[in-house]
Amino acid sequence: MIKKTEKIWMDGKFVDWDNANVHVMTHTLHYGLGVFEGIRCYETKEDPAIFRLKDHVERLFKSAHIFLLAIPYSEKEIEEAIIKTVKINKVKECYIRPLVYIGYGAMGLYPKDNPVEVAISVWPWGAYLGDDGLKNGIRVKVSSFIRNHVNSQMSRAKACGYYINSQLAKKEAISLGYDEALLLDTDGYVAEGSGENIFIVRDGRLKTTPLTSVLEGITRESIMKIARDEKIEVIEERFTRDELYIADEAFFTGTAAEVTPIREVDGRIIGEGKAGKVTKKLQSVFFDSVKGKNKKYGSWLTYVK
Ligand code: PPE
């Protein structure tokens, strides 16, 4: 169960968590066209810090742009609303979920005059794939469900409806006893997890899927930056599932999943079957950065005073 906080921002007003409702005829609830973000706020020695706020809000607006949704606020207004929502809920650490949805009005697939509404919720959310997963790695299953074609799922957007594909994959993986699903693209190459980007390490080199078929992950980009600063070579290149099977290390990245090592794929042990050396190094710089302990990446943090 979600750990509730006090207030949710709904179109400019703070509403009590228990009263943050929409009408059942809300358009997005029926047809799935909405866009959202997932952002984390971390406890630091100083005030709580939101990780890459501006980049997340920018992506939210780009997602809306792709889907021709006119958000009735500016990026700055949404950034400020997010900061206020974290502050009013007095949380030190939380996950932040801005959601843009089409409200009540007409039904049918062309809701020309329905309002575009925005809600911002925050709640404490621990390790997405478990504390043990974060430390020792998770078991992954290549899904029988294919990531939607790039002209069906325009992957630069983070849209609500896309996640029925992810949920099919996740349910299948869990039902077979795995922790997470890995989806292949329509050409059969590795795409991404149900809610994560993927990296592999081979001979000390880092490889990740190019952005053609996957979400432009902000954690992915942060890890690439950290790796290059650590003089680890990073390439964006399509790879096959068997290249993953024989990788020395593999890990997932995402706001929710952070940096989660992969220790097994389809019954094949990856590397030594635990968090690898490169993965651990990147994890450690990443967590130091988000927690304000690495000043080099200080510009990634927005402190909530
Ligand atoms: N791919 C997908 C499909 C995805 O959903 C996410 C985030 C990523 C990659 C990583 O992107 P980024 O967070 O910018 O590094 N998935 C979000 C939703 C998870 C959920 O269960 O809800 C997240 O991690 O917030």
Image (cartoon, rainbow, N blue to C red):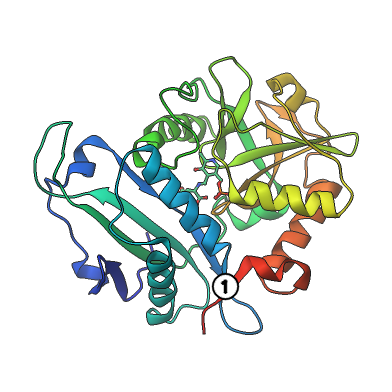
The quadrant the N terminus occupies is bottom left
The answer to which of 68 and 169 lies nearer the viewer is 68
- Look at mark 1 in the image and give the residue it sits on: 302
Ligand 1 has an atom within 8 Å of the beta carbon of the residue at disc 1: no
Residue at (78%, 47%) from the top-left corner?
275
Which of the 4 quarters of the picture holds residue 296? bottom right
Instruction: Single out the residue that lies furthest toward the left.
Output: 106
Residue 288 horizontal side relative to residue 119, left or right: right
Q: Is residue 267 left or right of residue 72?
A: right
Of residue 89 and residue 138, the one placed in the foreground of this image is 89
Name above or below for residue 13 compared with residue 102: below
Q: Is residue 281 above or below residue 177?
A: below
* Farthest residue, direction top: 187
Mark 1 element type? strand
- Establish if 240 lies above or below 228: above
Residue at 67% across, 48% down: 221
Q: Which residue occupies the foreground of this view, 66 or 196?
A: 66
Q: Position of residue 113 (x, y in %)?
A: 13, 45
Q: Percent from the top left, x then y, of residue 23?
A: 12, 53
Question: Which residue type does callout 1 highlight?
Answer: Thr
Which of the 4 quarters of the picture holds residue 266?
Answer: top right
Query: Residue at 49% across / 21% down in the picture?
Result: 146
Q: Position of residue 200 (x, y in %)?
A: 76, 35
Report if residue 141 is visible in the image: yes
Q: Give neighbour class at mark 1: few <14, some 14-19, many 20+ (Cα, 10 Å).
A: some
Image spot of residue 181 (x, y percent): 55, 33
